[in-house]
Image (cartoon, rainbow, N blue to C red):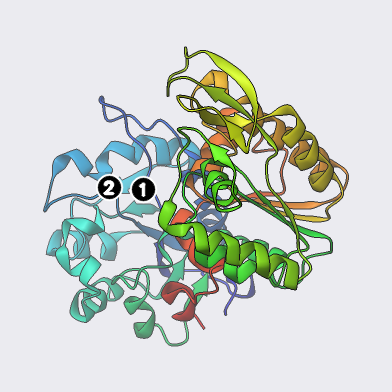
Amino acid sequence: MNSIYNYNFKNQKVLIRVDFNVPLNNEKKVTDRSRIVAAKTTIKKVLEDGGTPILMSHLGRPKGKDSEFSLSHIVKDVEDVLGVPVKFTRGVIESQTKELVQKSMPKEVLLLENLRFYPEEQKGDENFAKEISNLGDSYINDAFGTAHRAHASTTIIAKFFPQNKFAGDLLQKEIESIKKVMVSGEKPILGILGGAKVSSKITIIENIMSKVDKLIIGGGMSFTFIKALGGRIGDSICEDDKMSLALSIIEKAKKENVELCLPVDVVCADDFSNSANTKICEINNIPDGWQGMDAGPKSLEIFNKAILSSKTILWNGPVGVFEMESFSKGTVSVGKSVSQSTNNGSFSLVGGGDSVAAVKKFKFENKVSYVSTGGGAMLESLEGKTLPGIKALE
């Protein structure tokens, strides 16, 4: 895979697929610029070489050309992050866009309109990809968050740049951080998997079992394991149809010599509400009418010990209903332990929607080694799948 650092983009028009799928509030203002900031290094490299970055991205899930999802809403934020003016083209393949691109000068930045205004983008349409490719001399994919989609701008377009296709700085960092866990991680390697459902994590658990030395299973999905082992879980969330699977995971952990850490106690509530009555229960003895909402103090001691004795840590998913303040202590505690372990020299990778939201909410993002920007793409990488957007660059 070609690196942008082995090439000079002087006088080139460079198509850069970025992931500017950023959250907007009701006033159409950007509420989190992380994804724009993440693309800055690649864009700056092209600018410093004397090239013209032509940025392309999708935003949301528009049905046709819906002004609500226009990338015009984010132009000012892109300008603020890059510190340079940005020209916005109100289309992607229209004649006026082609004209703007042709007239653009070195060190000017252009931002194309939302790619998903065109149904051909998600269909992976070859003609559409070819039309976009005609705008540039080189192509850089820096959108790890969409690398698991075989869309026109993320995968198909690469074939029109047999020599001049590159992995951007962010994309390379994402690939390298996953490799650090899955391939070259210093032992002991720990996986922390949380969240509500076992079903959404099955393939990850199966794929990482042969790579990790320890596995913490927390959050709502732990109740499926506890019930499968004969525990009483009260009204806690549970996937009854996945109990035999949970038992087979426990068996596999024994066979692979993986230390499996399940919670032993939980903070229980008599209602799914921040203001519910709470008490600490043993996780296998929760009374009816009560449900587990967060990891309990003894569980957090077990987790802390496992985290501090690991050299490589993958964290995917919270260990409680962290969105409610009353049940956020467990996830905060895990964040503190991971931060401390990182400070002691461990490599820590956080990825997957909810865990990323948690590290941002509780200000841990600069205290871990790497926070992935690609939810679905990272999960598919951890499942052992080859991502089409990355394959296309090879």
Q: Is residue 50 visible?
A: no
Q: CA distance from mark 2 to mark 1?
A: 6 Å
Amino acid under disc 2 = Gly
Label 1 crowd bin: few (<14), some (14–19), many (20+), radius 10 Å = many
Q: From the top left corner, tell me how far across and down residue 178 is, in percent.
A: 64, 64
Q: Is 183 or 236 nearer to us in this picture?
A: 236
Q: From the top left corner, tell me how far across and down residue 101 is, in percent.
A: 28, 62
Counting every numbered tag in the picture gives 2
- Viewport quadrant of the N terminus: bottom right
Amino acid under disc 1 = Asn
Residue 172, placed above or below residue 23: below
Residue under numbered circle 2: 60
Q: Which element type, helix, strand or loop, lies under badge 2?
A: loop
Residue under numbered circle 1: 21
Q: From the top left corner, tell me how far across and down residue 23 is, in percent.
A: 36, 37
Q: Is 325 or 16 nearer to us in this picture?
A: 325
Q: Are marks 2 and 1 in contact (CB under 8 Å)?
A: yes
Q: Which element type, helix, strand or loop, lies under badge 1?
A: loop
Residue 104, placed above or below residue 14: above
Q: Measuring 58% from the left and 51% from the top, which residue is drawn there? A: 225
Q: Measuring 43% from the left and 20% from the top, which residue is drawn there? A: 271
Q: From the top left corner, tell me how far across and down residue 206 is, in percent.
A: 58, 69
